Amino acid sequence: MSKNPYESDELLQQYLIFHYASAEEQFPYAFGGADALDFPKRCVSEGIDVAALGETSRALDIGCSVGRSTFELARHCREVIGVDYSQAFIDGANRMKTHCLHPAWRSDEGSAATLLDLKVDAEIDPNRVHFETGDAQELRQDLGQFDIVIACNLICRLGEPMRLLERLQALVRPGGQLFITTPFTWLEAYTPPANWLGDGAEDSFAGLRSALEPDFELQRKWDMPFLIREHARKFQYSIAQASRWVRR
């Protein structure tokens, strides 16, 4: 049995809901939480400067999970590659690509659950999207260069985040965009403390900036909340730090 929690069916169902369920299906309350919905979609609509893209743009979604941001990038890019370490997540993303629909169980209360038919927007061309398994720290060498690279809520789940950060210069073409979000939730189960950015996470963004600034210029930095449903009365509300960079 895999030790990777992201291979479990429980998390697959949870992340399918997180990525594709409607606001009402995820959070049917009139108070709180609504500002944090649709995070994977907002990573593209808020994170990318669409006006700077050309008709033949390529995009790479590193740590794509079950693929919502990857599909959203296909609204603006001719080719999009989504990469994730979890085979279960990539299988789910590919089922969504093939059928443009994926059933998922939403946990409600105790053993009670609701089966939802989750869909990709019909305006998105799934043929523009390709999903594959891969380690963000050891991405294949023949990926080429991209006009957009995004890595959302990934860095603090890597054993050696600097290995990815050092590769980004080769992945983003000059003038291209890099968009990163992270809540900087450093846990020893994922990342040894010696590899936490910013002198042991005293200032994680300073560590991120130090790693990127030789090759990237910071364009914008802001906070992005996100909400993950566990059941009808329990949610994870977190705040990711978002930053958009332009390759020098």
Image (tube, rainbow, N blue to C red):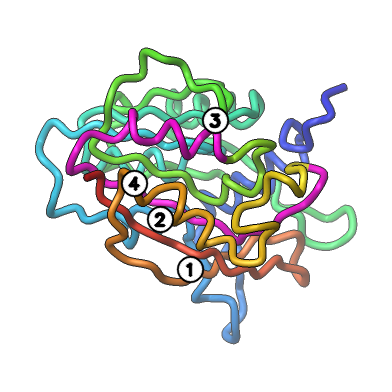
Residue 175, picture quadrant: top left
- What residue would you read off at disc 3? 136
Q: Which mark is residue 43?
A: 2
Residue 178 painted magenta: yes
Horizontal and vertical percent for residue 171?
Answer: 34, 30
Q: Is residue 40 above or below residue 87?
A: below
**Please, what secondary structure does the residue beneath circle 3 have?**
loop
Residue position for label 4: 214
Q: Amino acid at mark 2?
A: Cys
Residue bearing mark 1: 224
Q: Residue furthest top?
A: 142
* Disc 4 residue crowd, few under 14, some 14–19, many 20+, Cα 10 Å: few
Residue 6: x and y in percent read 72, 36
Q: Residue at x 88, y 22 (%)?
A: 1
Q: CA distance from mark 1 to mark 3?
A: 22 Å
* Numbered disc 2: secondary structure: helix
- 10 Å neighbourhood of mark 1: few (<14), some, or many (≥20)? many
Q: Amino acid at mark 3?
A: Ala
Q: Nearer the viewer, mark 3 or mark 4?
A: 4
The x and y percentages for residue 212 are: 40, 48
Q: Residue at x 59, y 40 (%)?
A: 161
Q: Which residues are the magenta region?
A: 162-189
Q: Looking at the picture, tell me which residue is in the foreground, 169 or 240.
A: 169
* First of labels 1, 2 by sequence position: 2
| In the image: residue 181, left or right of residue 111 | left
Q: Based on the picture, tell me whether residue 10 belongs to the magenta stretch.
A: no
Question: Seen from this angle, which residue lies furthest bottom?
Answer: 31
Nearest the eye: 4 or 118: 4
Q: Is tag 4's residue or tag 2's residue first in the polypeptide sequence?
A: 2
